[in-house]
């Protein structure tokens, strides 16, 4: 497994925290992305202890939920949850907290960005103190319930406006116009990259595939990310019925083999 490759707990969506630890051990995975939801199921302090005991290196914490930006009454509970997540990150040495913006609701794009800034103020302060970064993930336009930033370009705009980092979700932006230009603009703000594959024509969400099984030119996209100077983790994050049907362990093992090979070849422009 390539040293810069990480495996997200999201890739084994329905498995428990304990199941993930056991599977990662069988596969020899030592670099992982943690699901806040799964860690909460066992308790954040115990989860941190067990991650440390297993000798796991943490690339990020994700699956953090969201709140409605147009309803400030929903902010405090979410803020408390994010502050607890930051403390867990401090305990495990996690460098990046990956968030979606939450739905804009009745707000237009720019007012929603302002609301996100205000909502994240205490979380940003805590993350700064813990030496962690908050990264906003681009999402599919089919998922406005998760986020109002549905392109990489808009996510970079938002990160610049709010002085945050960027998580590149490849599945949601691989066919976007000016992909390389958006990467160049992101520059050092690019803090995390999530990798999976997609099948053109699918109307299901989520419907991520094992890298190499679909239509995304993953090799060239990885080459573009590397050319932009990115130095952090590439993470396998795939979820959907095809992964469920194959079985998490088999699908993750295939993904590790494929993406590790691409990373070893610097992305191999021209291959997917």
Image (spheres, grey):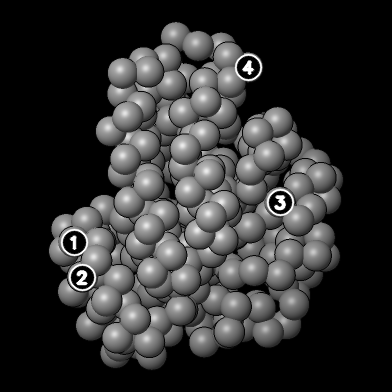
If the image is split into quadrants, where does the C terminus sit? bottom right
> Which quarter of the picture shows residue 113?
top right
In the picture of the structure, the residue carrying the numbered disc 3 is 189
Q: Are marks 2 and 1 in contact (CB under 8 Å)?
A: yes
In primary-sequence order, the first of circles 1 and 4 is 1
Residue occupying the point 80% across, 65% down: 229
Residue occupying the point 47% across, 66% down: 94
Q: Is residue 224 left or right of residue 43?
A: right
Q: Which mark is residue 110?
A: 4
Q: Secondary structure at mark 2?
A: helix
Q: Are marks 3 and 2 in contact (CB under 8 Å)?
A: no
Q: Secondary structure at mark 1?
A: loop
Mark pair 1, 4: CA separation: 36 Å
In primary-sequence order, the first of circles 3 and 2 is 2
Residue 147 vertical position relative to residue 234 in the rendered view, above or below: above
In the picture of the structure, the residue carrying the numbered disc 1 is 43
Residue occupying the point 25% across, 61% down: 44
> Which quarter of the picture shows residue 249?
bottom left
Q: Which mark is residue 46?
A: 2
Mark pair 3, 1: CA separation: 31 Å
Q: Are marks 1 and 4 in contact (CB under 8 Å)?
A: no
Mark pair 2, 1: CA separation: 5 Å
- Crowd tier of the residue under label 4, counting other residues whose Cα lies within 10 Å: few below 14, some 14–19, many 20 or above: few
């Amino acid at each position: 497994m390539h040293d810069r490759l990480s495996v997200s707990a999201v890739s084994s969506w329905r498995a428990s925290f304990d199941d993930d630890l056991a599977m990662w051990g069988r596969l020899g995975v030592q670099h992982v992305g943690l699901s806040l939801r799964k860690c909460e199921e066992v308790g954040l302090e115990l989860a941190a202890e067990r991650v440390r005991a297993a000798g796991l290196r943490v690339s990020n914490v994700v699956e953090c939920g969201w709140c409605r930006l147009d309803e400030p009454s929903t902010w405090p509970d979410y803020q408390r949850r994010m502050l607890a997540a930051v403390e867990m990150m401090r305990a495990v040495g996690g460098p990046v907290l990956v968030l979606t913006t939450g739905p804009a609701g009745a707000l237009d794009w720019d007012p929603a960005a302002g609301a996100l800034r205000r909502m994240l103020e205490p979380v940003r302060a805590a993350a700064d103190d813990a030496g962690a970064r908050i990264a906003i993930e681009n999402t599919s336009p089919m998922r406005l319930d998760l986020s109002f930033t549905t392109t990489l370009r808009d996510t970079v705009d938002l990160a610049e406006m709010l002085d945050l980092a960027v998580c590149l979700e490849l599945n949601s932006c691989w066919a976007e116009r000016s992909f390389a230009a958006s990467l160049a603009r992101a520059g050092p703000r690019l803090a995390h990259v999530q990798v999976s594959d997609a099948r053109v024509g699918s109307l299901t969400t989520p419907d991520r595939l094992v890298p190499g099984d679909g239509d995304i030119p993953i090799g060239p996209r990885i080459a573009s990310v590397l050319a932009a100077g990115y130095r952090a983790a590439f993470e396998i994050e795939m979820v959907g019925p095809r992964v469920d049907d194959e079985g998490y362990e088999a699908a993750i093992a295939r993904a590790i083999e494929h993406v590790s090979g691409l990373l070893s070849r610097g992305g191999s422009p021209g291959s997917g």
